[in-house]
Image (cartoon, rainbow, N blue to C red):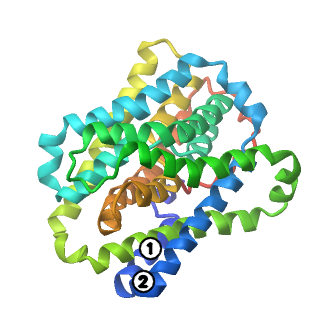
Amino acid sequence: MARSRLLPDNFTLYLIATVILASLFPAQGVFADALAWATKAAVSLLFFLHGAKLSRPAIFAGIGHWRLQLMVVATTFALFPLFGWALAPVLRPLVTPDLYTGVIYLCALPATVQSAIAFVSMARGNVPAAVCAASASTLLGVFLTPVALSLMLTQDAAMGDPLEAVGRISLQLLLPFVVGHLMRPWIAGFLQRRAVVMKVVDQGSILLVVYAAFSHAVVDGLWSQLPLSAMAGLLAVCALLLAVVLVLTAWGSRRLGFAKEDEIAIVFCGSTKSLITGVPMANVLFSASVAGAIVLPLMVFHQMQLMVCAVLAQRYARRADAPAAEVTGAAPALRR
């Protein structure tokens, strides 16, 4: 069982295929301009649907556990970025400058939603608190990610004005999310009956954005400027960051007296990073010429977190005092 979890899932294979397609046949000219508009529309639709899927009772069930929520927010937007920035003397020599900017960007991103909830459910942790923590992290990331990046990156990192970025991110991601959530009473049932369509929109939107980002990067010479040693260094950097945060969240949760179920929610919501938010946000925050290199660390970290957290969730689930699995609306797909 654990061995199968170490293999790439289908969505990861689609991502790899998309990168290869963009490398061989990058979008250029009029097609690239049309693709840019299509990606914006697809991402807005994606966040509209995610807002419609978000259950308000689940939010209220978890929001009362303020100590847990504060721990996840502090880990995601303070501890993680602090490590990425403080370890610069160790991390920077292992990768190229653009990849290191991507590592800093990775550290400042919000937590993933569906994967974190699925891991917490698999590990028999506090699922309502995880739903609240992961959802709140996504919404806070609209404001906190640009701010954190502006504090950690230099002016030559190809990042625009952070306040302007917050406005553009809010318009493209937050507004559709809120509108979708407000329309949930009327469309939630329809969406539940169209799970296959939801999956296609979900994964298709990310693949479209990845293709657009890597097309720009390939045209500007991404692969000719990226040595194999930098890719090996990137794997080491992502492994180090993930290991440090997993250890510290587990240790900190126990030191602060959290129950085991709460510790599980903190570990998985605090250590994971969102591909579904990170890829579109990179197109807003960074110039098209570097966006492909910026999201590459996120894609590597994404697969690494899925493999490691799946094994860790199984270890948590086998503990002697584990309660019966809670029935939730979270899908077990470990995509994001």
Residue 318 x, y percent position in the rendering:
57, 35
Circle 2 SS class: loop
- Disc 2 marks which residue? 27
Comes first in the chain, label 2 or label 1? 2
Which of these two is toward me, 315 or 253? 253
In this rendering, the count of numbered labels is 2
Which of these two is toward me, 327 or 160? 160
Which of these two is toward me, 138 or 283? 283
Q: Is residue 183 left or right of residue 275?
A: right
Q: Which mark is residue 212?
A: 1
Label 2 with label 1: CB-CB less than 8 Å: yes
Local crowd size for mark 1, using a 10 Å CA cut-off: few (<14), some (14–19), many (≥20): many
Q: Residue at x 45, y 13 (%)?
A: 256
Q: Residue at x 57, y 73 (%)?
A: 38
Circle 1 SS class: helix
Amino acid residing under circle 1 = Ala
Amino acid residing under circle 2 = Ala
Residue 284 x, y percent position in the rendering:
43, 57
* Placement of 217 over or under 86, stated as above or below: below
* Placement of 311 over or under 258, stated as above or below: below
Q: Which mark is residue 13?
A: none
Q: Quadrant of residue 69?
A: top right
Local crowd size for mark 2, using a 10 Å CA cut-off: few (<14), some (14–19), many (≥20): many
Q: Is residue 206 left or right of residue 210?
A: right
Q: Residue at x 52, y 16 (%)?
A: 258
Residue 304 x, y percent position in the rendering:
39, 53
